[in-house]
Image (cartoon, grey):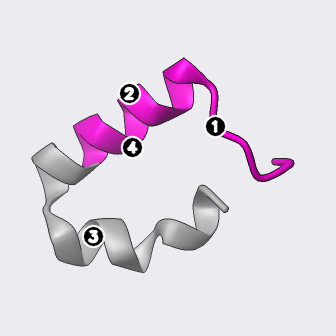
């Protein structure tokens, strides 16, 4: 990924954050960056 998020990426991140919680999100941040 080139450092910018598409709308779809942002929706996935938002969904993952809400579904899995902050710890999961932080643990998996490297997948989005």
**Picture coordinates of residue 6 (x, y %)?**
63, 26
Which stretch appears magenta?
1-16
* Cα gap from disc 4 to disc 3, whole angstroms: 11 Å
Mark 1 and mark 3 lie on one chain; the one further toward the N terminus is 1
Mark 1 and mark 2 lie on one chain; the one further toward the N terminus is 1
Question: For mark 2, what is the residue?
Answer: 11
Q: Are marks 4 and 1 in contact (CB under 8 Å)?
A: yes
Vertical side of 13 occupied by 12: above or below: above
Q: Are marks 1 and 2 in contact (CB under 8 Å)?
A: no
23 to the left or right of 27: left
* Cα gap from disc 1 to disc 3, whole angstroms: 19 Å
Classify 10 Å Cα crowding around label 1: few (below 14), some (14-19), many (20 and above): few
Classify 10 Å Cα crowding around label 2: few (below 14), some (14-19), many (20 and above): few
Residue under the point 46% across and 69% down: 28
Question: For mark 1, what is the residue?
Answer: 5
* Cα gap from disc 4 to disc 1, whole angstroms: 10 Å
Classify 10 Å Cα crowding around label 3: few (below 14), some (14-19), many (20 and above): few
Secondary structure beneath dot 2 equals helix
Question: For mark 4, what is the residue?
Answer: 13
Question: For mark 3, what is the residue?
Answer: 24
Secondary structure beneath dot 1 equals loop
Labels 4, 1: front one: 1
Residue under the point 50% across and 68% down: 29
* Cα gap from disc 2 to disc 4, whole angstroms: 5 Å
Q: Is residue 15 magenta?
A: yes
Secondary structure beneath dot 4 equals helix
């Amino acid at each position: 990924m080139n450092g910018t998020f598409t709308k779809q990426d942002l929706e996935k991140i938002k969904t993952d954050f809400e579904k899995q919680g902050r710890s999961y999100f932080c643990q998996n941040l490297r997948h989005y960056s």
